[in-house]
Amino acid sequence: MKFFSTRDKNEAVSFKEAIFRGLAPDGGLYMPETMPDLSGLIASFTPETPFIDIATSITDALLSEELGEGAAERICRRAFDFEPRLAEVDDNISVLELYHGPSCAFKDFGASFLASSMEELLKSDSRKAMILTATSGDTGSAVARAFYEKENIEVVILYPSGRVSPLQEKQLTTLGKNIRALEVKGSFDDCQRMVKEAFLDRELSEKLSLTSANSISLGRLIPQSFYYIWAWAQAAGHRDAESRSDLTFCVPSGNFGNLTAGIMAHIWGMKNKGFIAATNINDVVPEYLKSGEFAPRASKLTLSNAMDVGNPSNFERMLELFGESHEKMTDLIKEEVITDSETKAEIAKLLTEKNYEADPHTAVGYLASEHHIKQDGGRIITLSTAHPGKFSEVYEEATGKKPHMPERLLDVMKLEKKSTIVENTLEALKEAIN
Ligand SMILES: *Cc1c(COP(=O)(O)O)cnc(C)c1O
């Protein structure tokens, strides 16, 4: 299978090129050139099929032509020593928990698969690479954990000094080995600018084989389809097989990579009813679904801050998947917008009424699902994108209680921070990494 840029369909590249480039040279995002029909394979999965087998089979179907026999299994076995879980919170709403990975957020699935794929591909031509990435706090930890101890790959993470939470800082700075944290005297925007400048510096970029691992990478998009297919297969055991075609997935969204991966699974042959795009007040995609107008704007701060995105990059991919048709998109995707006060009330309500601990992003999705069911009925699987322990301040504010903290978050708090403080200039960055 080849991949093309959303902005130029004439130049197809391999999976390998697509993942080491990250963004296409024309600024577009990589997409599969043709959509395979995997409906037979997907229909063959049962509630007993382990997640790892589904991940391996889909990877094999998509990439074996390029990667050869056995690679899919090697990549997936190394990537996934964790699994999604499905919690039945209500008769008609289940929560697909995607936070049982190393950093306690759904981004672990994408980052782990990308890291394993890169390791596999570097091994075959004995190259080294350096991942350079900027984080505002939350997303860097999934990348750090995913690439930890991967062979021939060094990771450098830039984060703004004093502007990430204590837990986030520990998650970024305590791993060591091939993961280095640079604490930048400046803002997140400075960090992003420095990374951009480093990539534009040809000499530096070639010398160090700089590459990115950011969320628009094709290598992070593809694996996000696996858990939709796994959850859909689980639903076969729920009452009767027919319930699968009645299933709607609700996806709390920011940059819309997660939802895009679900739509791809649907197009490959996962026969579910549809999707709900749930957002906080950063609602440019719901606005588009309602009006047909896409009007990006500056993002606003909310309690579900991993979804504070004013110009979602993956919208370009969504348009492509629906042949630019607003009508086709709205046939499959419904929209819901949730405010901060609703989010807080929902976190409290889920705890008191369902005895379920939800983080703010999950609460957005859950309330959106309830709104949708009131109107349309049916059965919903809503995606839980982070462990409540990662957002314990908001959780406590909403409920007056502390969430259960997973061991791996408690452990990380005990480790010693190791970072290098750097000025907010390219020169300082060069000095640190060269
Ligand atoms: C990144 C993130 C999201 C948004 O996912 P997108 O793929 O960008 O739409 C939602 N919740 C959490 C916790 C996240 O980290």
Image: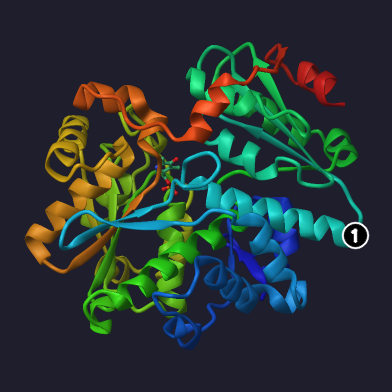
For mark 1, give the secondary structure: loop
Question: Could you tell me which quadrant the C terminus lies in?
Answer: top right
User: In the shown orientation, is residue 35 left or right of residue 65?
Assistant: left
Q: Amino acid at mark 1?
A: Asp
Q: Quadrant of the N terminus?
A: bottom right
Categorize mark 1 by other alpha carbons within 10 Å: few (<14), some (14-19), many (20+): few
Query: Residue at (61%, 27%) from the top-left corner?
Result: 172
Task: Name the image quarter holding residue 176.
Answer: top right
Image location of residue 320, percent across then percent down: 47, 66
User: Is the CB atom of the residue marked by disc 1 within 8 angstroms of ligand 1's nearest atom?
Assistant: no
State the image coordinates of residue 317 (x, y, percent, origin top left). Answer: 48, 60
Name the spot of residue 406 as percent of width and height, x first.
44, 35
For ligand 1, which image quadrant applies?
A: top left
- Residue closest to the eye, 410 or 265: 410
Query: Which image quadrant for residue 64?
Result: bottom right
Check disc 1 and report the residue beneath it: 125
| 323 horizontally vs 212: left or right | left
Q: Nearer the viewer, residue 189 or 326?
A: 189
Between 341 and 287, the one nearer to me in the picture: 341
Residue at left 43%, top 68%? 230
| Labels in figure, total | 1
Q: Residue at x 20, y 41 (%)?
A: 338
Residue lying at 46% horizontally and 69% vertically, measured from the top left: 264
The percent position of residue 209, horizontal first and vertical second, equals 84, 43
Can residue 13 be seen in this snapshot? no
Q: Is residue 47 above or below residue 151?
A: below
